[in-house]
Amino acid sequence: QVQLVESGGGLVQAGGSLRLSCVGSGRTFGSYDMGWFRQAPGKEREFIATINWSGSRTYYADAVKGRFTISRDSTKPTVYLQMNSLKPEDTAVYSCAARPFGSWPESKDYEYDYWGQGTQVTVSS
């Protein structure tokens, strides 16, 4: 069992930056691949990025490639999403998710077993 708690969301102007954190609990957190997803009002959940259990591999959606960076701290049960050059269309609730390491890369939300409650990111124009 893994519990996930996101933080770091907020209101930012277009072109600005935010860093989201996802703190996990559970003895096996370090063996999980992690992902970030987002969901805007009236839209389906969208894959953003994933990082493998060791932090050695990352994969991004085209919409955020070059602007967002996913990382994890090997000394803490924490995964980060650094978001730069934010755009109004990045406005959404951002959630982190965990799955036991397996096929790579995994962008399908139903393949993730554990989810945080989400944090709101609002980008003003």
Image: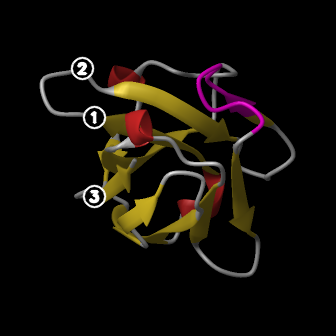
Q: Main secondary structure of the magenta part?
A: loop
Q: Secondary structure at mark 2?
A: loop
Which residue is denoted by mark 1 in the rendering?
A: 39
Dot 1 and dot 2 residues touching (CB under 8 Å)? yes
Q: How is the image coloured?
A: secondary structure
Q: Is residue 62 above or below residue 96?
A: above
**What amino acid type should be assigned to the residue bearing mark 2?**
Glu
Q: Residues within 10 Å of mark 1 (few under 14, many from 20)?
A: some
**What amino acid type should be assigned to the residue bearing mark 1?**
Gln
Q: Residue at x 40, y 33 (%)?
A: 89
Q: Is residue 110 left or right of residue 71?
A: left
Query: Reading the chain from its start, which is encountered first: label 1 or label 2?
Result: 1
Q: Residue furthest right?
A: 56
- Can see residue 26? no
Depth check: 49 or 108 in front? Answer: 49
Q: Which mark is residue 44?
A: 2
Q: Residue at x 15, y 33 (%)?
A: 41
Confirm whether the magenta stretch covers residue 39: no
* Residue 17 location (% of width, % of height): 59, 62
**Which contiguous range is marked in magenta?**
59-66
- Can see residue 108? yes
